[in-house]
Image (cartoon, rainbow, N blue to C red):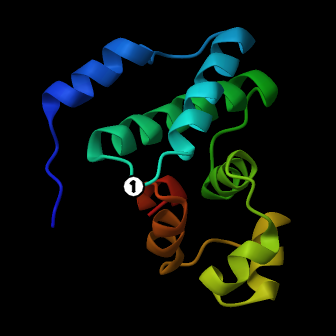
Amino acid sequence: MTLTFSSQKYSDLLVKYQPKLIKTEDENERMLAVIEELMHIQNRTPEEEDLYELLIVLIEKFESDFYRPGATSTPDSMLLFLMEQQKVQPEDLVEVVGSSNVVLELVNGKGEISDELPETLGNFFKVDSSLFGR
């Protein structure tokens, strides 16, 4: 069964959480709490999934600008961010990626996310694969 997207439900979520560009650490903490709440929902609705992905992008932008001025978000930084937020350990990714060496290279910033990995990582983290650069 394919779930359909409800503009009204998404609108209700936007009103409830009021996502916007994050400019302070307090705002960031508030959005991290929402992410935590959404992460623990089993079988998120399409609307919750879109809000979840939006908040990840907003948080990543804030943290990149605030904690690493001048650095841009990269597929590698998105991977590390999602691992941290979802408490995923490198060993958890071995089955997903297929090689412990590749995982170690990715988490240590020495490897690149190959062409086939964005979709695999997107499915694993339940986010849009474009967050990984493809």
Viewer-proximal residue among 53 and 60: 53
**Residue type, mark 1 in image:** Asn
Where is 62 relative to 102, above or below? Answer: above
User: Considering the image in quadrants, where does the N terminus appear?
Assistant: bottom left
Residue 69 falls in which quadrant of the image? top right
Q: Residue at x 57, y 78 (%)?
A: 114
Q: Number of callouts in the render?
A: 1
**21 over 45 or under it: above or below:** above
Tell me, yes or no, if residue 105 can be seen here.
Answer: no
Q: Give the percent coordinates (x, y) of residue 119.
A: 44, 71
Residue 41 can be seen in this image: yes
Of all residues, the one furthest to the front in this rendering is: 42
Q: Residue at x 39, y 55 (%)?
A: 43
> In the rendered view, would you say 90 is above or below 8?
below
Q: Tell me what residue is drawn at x 49 percent, y 53 percent.
A: 131
Q: Residue lying furthest bottom in this view?
A: 98
The answer to which image quadrant residue 10 occupies is top left
* Near-viewer residue (53 or 66): 53
- Name the spot of residue 65 as percent of width and height, x first: 69, 25
In the displayed structure, 122 sits above or below 4; it is below
Disc 1 target residue: 43
In percent of the image, x 67 and y 72: which residue is there? Answer: 112
Q: Secondary structure at mark 1?
A: loop
Where is the C terminus found, in terms of image quarters?
A: bottom left
> In the picture provided, is 132 more to the left or to the right than 10?
right
Q: Position of residue 132 (x, y in %)?
A: 53, 59
Please state if 14 lies on the left or on the right of 29 as rendered.
left
Disc 1 crowd rating (10 Å Cα; few below 14, some 14-19, many 20+) is: few
Counting from the top left corner in percent of width and height, residue 51 is at 39, 34
Q: Nearer the viewer, residue 4 or 84?
A: 4
